[in-house]
Amino acid sequence: MNIPVKKRAYQDGCAVAHALDIIGDRWAMPIMRELMLGPKRFTDLRAGLPGISANVLTQRLDELEAASILVRRRLPPPAASQIYELTDWGRESEILFQTLGRWACRSPTMEPGKPMSTVSVILSMRTMIDRARLGDLDAVVGFAFGEETFRATIADGDCRIDRGDISDANVIFRGDQNALVALLYGGARPEHVSDALTIEGDKALARRFAGLFPLPPKAPSTCRAD
Amino acid sequence: MNIPVKKRAYQDGCAVAHALDIIGDRWAMPIMRELMLGPKRFTDLRAGLPGISANVLTQRLDELEAASILVRRRLPPPAASQIYELTDWGRESEILFQTLGRWACRSPTMEPGKPMSTVSVILSMRTMIDRARLGDLDAVVGFAFGEETFRATIADGDCRIDRGDISDANVIFRGDQNALVALLYGGARPEHVSDALTIEGDKALARRFAGLFPLPPKAPSTCRAD
DNA sequence: CTGTATCCGTGTTGATACTG
DNA sequence: CAGTATCAACACGGATACAG
């Protein structure tokens, strides 16, 4: 275990500065994001964070543990593998991601189309879903991205989206999560969805679901170099 | 003007990753914070950001301008000086600071007592004030930190805090903003406030105002090294 | 006085290779 | 699988010099 050497810190009593001291380092928030829907192993984390190197991931995990944002746990045999899991307080940071996402998706310099991790896609749906459009919809929508499955449970004007079994889903989106993003936010119609995504089950429900994610208007660009 | 060279970026479609690309660099958010209550000049920014160096500030200002978060304006003669001002969208990022501040002030590793800029103190009041405690309070509370004055206008169950004239204030807190922080969040009584802060006017109102800022409970520390 | 540009020492980051 | 070691590239902070 490394001695958590003193790092560069803002010497500032502002709580925001403290937040930046503990989660402002490069990769810290993406790591937290990947853990938001449940614990993961070292290698699973790397898979969801293309570009991170092993040593940086190790260091960030140490720092996030020191900040009480996550804990390491060793799985009981026969797994014998370590997992990283957010603490309660770490999980409460989801509001940070939602606020940041809502603000940033209006950025004039945001260009869509880059790949997203499965966790990002689920969290973006949690963030952007317009509950006012749910009406009295009552349904289970499933998502199957590779080996991972998630379910949206819609009832009583609310919608919860989590990891979970999808055998009882009324409709299942199966395939590449990036194709789902194009459908939800890109304005494509479920009838014309790409080959990377298949829709199994209630097609009308799929269409209804895809319309639950309005994008806010872009902020104007004020950069002279535009 | 520098060519805005491509910098290290997350290659990630997630809006949060885009946010981190544009405001995740060191000093970017503290700079935005300092501009949140109105435009400032280069030197005023440095004064509110102890530790930043001139070249880093220049670079961040360029990047924030390219992201349409702020604009440079040249004041009309005889001032002839440049100022940096948030755009509308940049100003809308205040919700980020509030969310981050509310989450981070529960951090088990947050230690109080470090100095804060005047802007930080005002923003923290905007963030932490408990409007449910306002009742039918109707008053103007003034703050005089050095040459800067701010006013809290309390009426109709709401409270707005901004830069502004305080000649009509019912009570004025004058002196060091850090002493005010100790009073609001440290539990000190206005009667025993330090020499660094004086209270002019309605002492009962000062006491009432100081009780409007409850701190949420700390999150438990889970770090084994504690 | 108000910034901006350049140099430089240092620490952080990132890619590759490697070990338990 | 879960990291550690090594090294190169870059970013940061400080100082200084310079331009309007």
Image: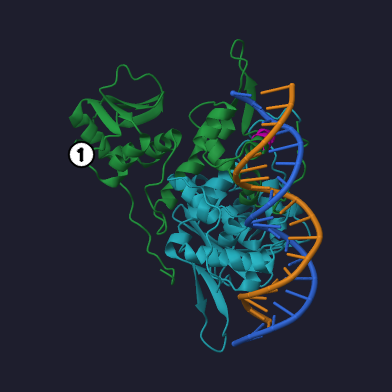
Chain colours: A green, B cyan, C orange, D blue
Q: Give A202 or B88, whichever is nearer the viewer.
A: A202
What span is colored magenta in the figure? Answer: A61-67
Residue furthest out toward the top? A78
Mark 1 sits on what residue?
Answer: A192
Q: Secondary structure at mark 1?
A: helix
Q: How many numbered discs?
A: 1
Three-letter code for the amino acid on which mark 1 is drawn: His
When asked about the image quadrant of residue A226, the answer is: bottom left
B129 lies above or below A69 = below
Image quarter of residue A204: top left
Pick out the residue farthest to the bottom: B78
Q: Residue at x 66, y 61 (%)?
A: B117
In the displayed structure, would residue A161 be above or below residue B3? above
Magenta span: helix, strand or loop, mainly? helix
- Is residue A66 on the magenta stretch? yes
Q: What x and y, as percent, mark residue B120? A: 62, 57
Q: Quadrant of the C terminus of chain B?
A: top right
Q: Nearer the viewer, residue B166 or A208?
A: A208
Residue A89: which quarter of the image?
top right
Crowd around label 1: few <14 · some 14–19 · many ≥20 (10 Å): few
The chain holding disc 1 is A
Residue at 64% of width from left, 40% of height from top?
A56
> On screen, A11 above or below B201?
above
Q: Is residue A91 visible?
A: no
User: Residue A173, position in %: x, y?
Assistant: 30, 29
Q: Nearer the viewer, residue B216 or A8?
A: A8
Check if residue B56 falls in the magenta segment. Answer: no
Query: Which quarter of the rendered picture does the N terminus of chain B lie within?
Result: bottom right
- The image position of residue A157, as x and y in percent, is 30, 31
Up the image or down, A188 lies above or below A173; here it is below
Q: Is residue A124 left or right of residue A76?
A: left
Q: Nearer the viewer, residue A96 or A173?
A: A173
